[in-house]
Image: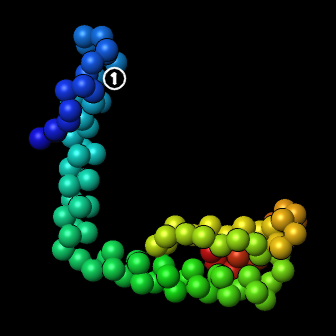
């Protein structure tokens, strides 16, 4: 079942291209989304991601104190961004390329 507000249809032409997605949905995507939501409700995945994500974020933030090539670290859960620009905000492109190569060489 798909529920949405009627104003989403206002201004769209009858049989318009967008109506196939908004009105009919994608059955496979809807089934996958429902399965994921069901799993999230029945598991401890979200609390684990929140807990472990905080730990990883703290580790990266501590690393910025030891590595001058690291700048700002921010994130939520496992969606974490690390800025490789250092305290002076100058991009560290060459450093990132070497780091990327080393990570790939070590199985990442």
SS for callout 1: loop
Specify the quadrant of the image occupied by residue 95. Answer: bottom right
Q: Residue at x 78, y 89 (%)?
A: 66
Decide if residue 101 is in sight here.
no
Q: Residue furthest left?
A: 1
Q: Is residue 75 left or right of residue 69?
A: left
Decide if residue 13 is in sight here.
yes
Q: Quadrant of the N terminus?
A: top left
92 or 31: nearer the viewer: 92
Q: Is residue 60 above or below residue 13?
A: below
Tell me where residue 40 appears, x and y as whole percent: 25, 69
Residue annotated with mark 1: 18
Q: Is residue 1 left or right of residue 27?
A: left
Q: Quadrant of the C terminus?
A: bottom right
Display colour scheme: rainbow
Q: Residue at x 20, y 35 (%)?
A: 4
Q: Residue at x 31, y 14 (%)?
A: 11
Q: How many marks?
A: 1
Q: Is residue 87 above or below residue 9?
A: below
Q: Residue furthest top?
A: 14
Q: Residues within 10 Å of mark 1 (few under 14, many from 20)?
A: few
Q: Is residue 3 above or below residue 23?
A: below
Tell me where residue 69 appears, x and y as whole percent: 83, 75
Q: Residue at x 87, y 63 (%)?
A: 90
Tell me where residue 30 appears, x and y as whole percent: 23, 46
70 or 16: nearer the viewer: 70
Tell me where residue 37 appears, x and y as whole percent: 23, 61
Specify the quadrant of the image occupied by residue 25. Answer: top left
80 or 7: nearer the viewer: 7
């Amino acid at each position: 079942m798909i529920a949405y507000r009627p104003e989403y249809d206002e201004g769209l032409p009858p049989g318009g291209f967008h109506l196939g997605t908004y009105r009919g949905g994608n059955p496979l995507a809807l089934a996958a989304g429902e399965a994921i939501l069901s799993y999230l409700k029945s598991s401890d995945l979200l609390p684990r991601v929140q807990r472990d994500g905080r730990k990883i974020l703290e580790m990266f933030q501590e690393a910025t104190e030891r590595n001058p090539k690291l700048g700002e670290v921010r994130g939520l859960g496992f969606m974490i961004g690390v800025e490789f620009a250092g305290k002076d905000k100058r991009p560290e492109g060459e450093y990132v390329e070497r780091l990327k190569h080393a990570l790939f060489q070590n199985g990442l």
